[in-house]
Image (spheres, helix red, strand yellow):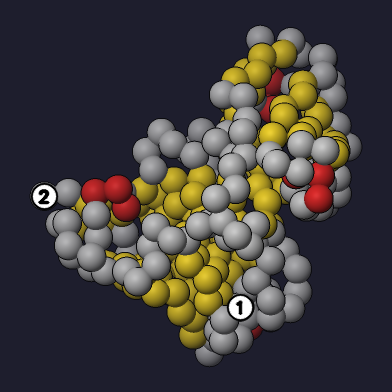
Amino acid sequence: SYVLTQPPSVSVAPGKTARITCGGNNIGSKSVHWYQQKPGQAPVLVIYYDSDRPSGIPERFSGSNSGNTATLTISRVEAGDEADYYCQVWDSSSDHLWVFGGGTKLTVL
Amino acid sequence: EVQLVESGGGLVQPGGSLRLSCAASGFTFSSYAMSWVRQAPGKGLEWVSAISGSGGSTYYADSVKGRFTISRDNSKNTLYLQMNSLRAEDTAVYYCAKDLDYGDTAMGLLDYWGQGTLVTVSS
């Protein structure tokens, strides 16, 4: 079963840069997607295919993926970015074909 | 505007059954694969099942295989999840979600999500 490992929490001051990592065995060979979920709301896709942004997502959100780590970067963090963030990949050998990371709680100080 | 509205959740006893529905609008339903994703209280996201646009291909997480059945009625723009032999660990909010990519193949890249329906399995 393929496992995606995210830090439980990341804290950042407003205006600074937040980096949320997603670790997995040779994850650089897979396409990684990122979702944002605010309390009581459904998830929202913020990055797909490692670094593409859906329409309506600010350019402050970017992604990268190499080796064993994918990273979601949020520049010039705002209070409204406070949320849980989940990475996701497809893995044909897993017991869950589409695997989510455990999620990272982003706190804006 | 894309809308996904789930219904059918509720309280059910262990071993019982429930059928969830997801009414879709604002896009050509039959042209997109759909998924169910659940979230246990206070926990993370767990992919449950997916179905191709035509309904010809279905996919399940091992945790629900043999107990849950995904289906769709493209004439009614509705997605279903039949859940049998429910267990306490199936307690979660169940979301339906649409694939981003146009086409019959399920990619699991989900660009629109419903607001979810809560399933509680308890005696």
Q: Quadrant of residue A36?
A: top right
The outermost residue toward the right is A59
**At which x and y percent is residue B68?**
36, 69
**At which x and y percent is residue A83?**
61, 29
Q: Quadrant of residue B107?
A: bottom right
Tell me, for residue B72, which label it has, or none: none
The 10 Å Cα crowd at callout 2, few under 14, some 14 to 19, many 20 or more, is: few
Query: Whole-Å distance between the Cαs marked 2 and 1?
Result: 35 Å
The residue lying at 76 percent from left, 13 percent from top is A14
* Residue identifier under label 2: B123
The residue lying at 75 percent from left, 44 percent from top is A27
Q: Nearer the viewer, residue A85 or B89?
A: B89
Relative to B54, does residue B8 appear above or below in the rendering? above
The residue lying at 72 percent from left, 64 percent from top is B100
Chain assignment, label 2: B
The residue lying at 57 percent from left, 24 percent from top is A8
Inspect the image, locate mark 1, and give the three-letter code of the amino acid beneath it: Ser
Q: Earlier in the sequence, mark 2 or mark 1?
A: 1
* Residue identifier under label 1: B52
